[in-house]
Amino acid sequence: MCAIVTLTACTPAGSTEFALGDGGDYLDAELRTAVEQLQSDVATAPTDETTVAERARVIADWADAYALAGGEVGLEGPRVRLRATLPPSGPAARRASADVDRLVREFTLRDEAGALGALEAESLGPFEARSYATLRQTWTAGTRGVPTGGGFWVARHFNANFGPFQTNDPAGEGYVTLATSDGDAVFSVDEIMASGPHGGFRAPQPALVFRLTTGELSPGESVTITYGDTGGGGPGLQIPSTSSARMPLPLYVDLDGSREWRPLPGSLDAIAALCDAGFRVIVVSDQSGIGRGLFSEADLTGIHRKMTEAAEAAGGEIAAIYYCP
């Protein structure tokens, strides 16, 4: 059973050289200079179609060096070189550019000693296939805590067929809970639409998030995710049906509350196409989270602003936004 911590969002930080066992920098002088220039360039101007190939090349070299030094590069790290060898254009370039900028911010954090904290898993097995068990992962904040708005995405790998995750019925199977050592940190259950190997592989699917709604998780404090909590009488989490030495339980942490969950693929391009065809685009949504106290109207206004800016950057325009709280 393995545990993965992956960044969903991150904040640029000052350059701190990640040391090898002998105390040296894992990047040679030339690549370190290129990385620092890349960090500066991304902070100054977002990547676009004219810069995506060169920036992708640098981040790919950076990810390779990090992996060779023993670091974890996540799902995106090995794939970014395609942006350099086969530079995208048009709408694909906009999506790839956003991915490159996010990876630069992610690896800036990976490069900062202690920023990602430490993750430990207990109850590592072995387990009998399709039996029920309780699994726990504990993440301890490092040099960076988690502010209000940050949180944890309890992801699922598409090829590891654990039983369902749920947070509504303590007596049911797959009951997932979060506990924290930080007394002033309050988390609530949230949901995002996730795609890819750790979401819906063929289409976006609802995914479980624990969002920090009150207080902060301070450096040194911990969060424990329990999969198959039996405290309420439930049987636990059903173990996968296939024999394997590695069944991932991916865990993502949002360290800055920026909620960098990207729009569904193609949605921004569709808005631009509708505008080009003479249509007015109006967004209508159900925001019951306001009524349940999960977030405020001010939070939603910020989300709408980002959505409007993203549509404009893609060449479209959102004429009006209506919502029901």
Image: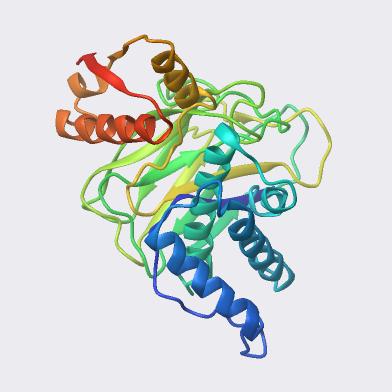
The location of residue 15, given as percent across then percent down, is 45, 76
Q: Residue at x 75, y 52 (%)?
A: 85
254 is higher (above) or lower (below) than 297: below
10 vs 128, left or right, is left
The location of residue 291, given as percent across then percent down, is 18, 19
16 is higher (above) or lower (below) than 314: below
Give the mark count: 0
Q: Nearer the viewer, residue 308 or 314?
A: 314
71 vs 171, left or right, is right
Q: Nearer the viewer, residue 99 or 41?
A: 41
194 is higher (above) or lower (below) than 186: above
Q: Residue at x 26, y 23 (%)?
A: 289
Task: Give the quadrant of residue 143.
Answer: bottom left
> Can residue 115 be spotted in the picture?
no
Q: Residue at x 58, y 40 (%)?
A: 93
The location of residue 260, given as percent across then percent down, is 41, 42
Q: Nearer the viewer, residue 163 or 319?
A: 319
